[in-house]
Amino acid sequence: MRIDAHQHYWKINRADYGWITPDIPVLYRDFMVNDLKKHLEENNIDKTIVVQAAPTIEETEFILDLSTHSTSIAGVVGWVDLEDPTYKEQLNKFREHPKFIGIRIMIQDMPDESRILEPHYLEAFAYLEELDLPIDLLVKASQLPVLLKLLNQVSIRGVIDHIAKPNIAKGELEPWKRQISEIAKHPNIYCKLSGMVTEANHNNWRIEEFIPYVHHIIEEFGTNRVMYGSDWPVCLLSASYNQVYQLLKDTLPRNITSVEIERIFGANAIEFYQLDKL
């Protein structure tokens, strides 16, 4: 089964997408299941993982409801407020839904990312570790040192979204490369080859710019712990769905095997998100 492991749906009138404003007209409209259907068919993608795009309980309920009525949605990565004392109750409620497969921690948006090292967060991560719940980690490259400290204290099942958003537009590789290498030493951590085009020059990117980043991820995580994600429709800021899909195919190492390609474009997502248990 071929899976796009990272995409979003939203309805603007729900009004909890604070980052999507009329100043971004390409994104400031509804994006729903039928809008993506053609692109999935054109690229032979069978199913997708829908990831929350707003840090609200209502957003998770919205995409879970979508998943109930869509066979193309393999699973939903939602959101809970780990600072809320009742987060376990909310999490357990979501876990009753057959397509709820994990949560995303939006470290990127924290005023101080070191908060994830505070006792109440460490307790929450220990609970998530006990559940073996998949956790998407939305981080920027500058936040990787704190994430490393966290991973040295907990053994969560985690995946780095968007290769941790290095500055591809400026070709910055260090200290991102060194820190990614350290993170990859944690066997429970995967990485999504997603969200790269929006870290490049939106109007003038070249395939060659992405090769050092993709190759480093493959070298450090191997082909068993990385997965394709389109980040549609956010990717439309820089590229079409088809361009994003082709970009990854064009930047993978030339000696990669067909079996490894199958893992990157589906099998690894099935393993990480435990989709075979659904």
Image (spheres, rainbow, N blue to C red):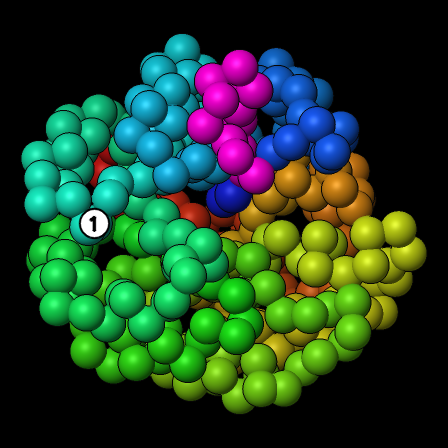
Look at 73% across and 34% down and name the residue there. 24
- 134 to the left or right of 130: right
Q: Nearer the viewer, residue 25 or 5?
A: 25
- 268 to the left or right of 10: left
Q: Nearer the viewer, residue 258 or 13?
A: 13
Please say whether residue 219 is visible from this viewpoint: no
Q: Which residues are magenta?
A: 7-19
Look at 74% across and 33% down and name the residue there. 23
The amino acid type, in three-letter code, at marker 1 is Leu
Q: Nearer the viewer, residue 56 or 232?
A: 56
Quadrant of residue 4 within the rendered picture: top right
Look at 65% across and 40% down and name the residue there. 234
Q: Residues within 10 Å of mark 1 (few under 14, many from 20)?
A: some
Prevailing secondary structure class for the magenta stretch in the rendered image: loop
> What residue is pinned by disc 1?
82
Q: Position of residue 80 (x, y in %)?
A: 25, 41
Placement of 243 over or under 155, stated as above or below: above
Q: Is residue 10 magenta?
A: yes
Label 1 sits on a secondary structure element that is loop
Look at 15% across and 33% down and name the residue there. 90
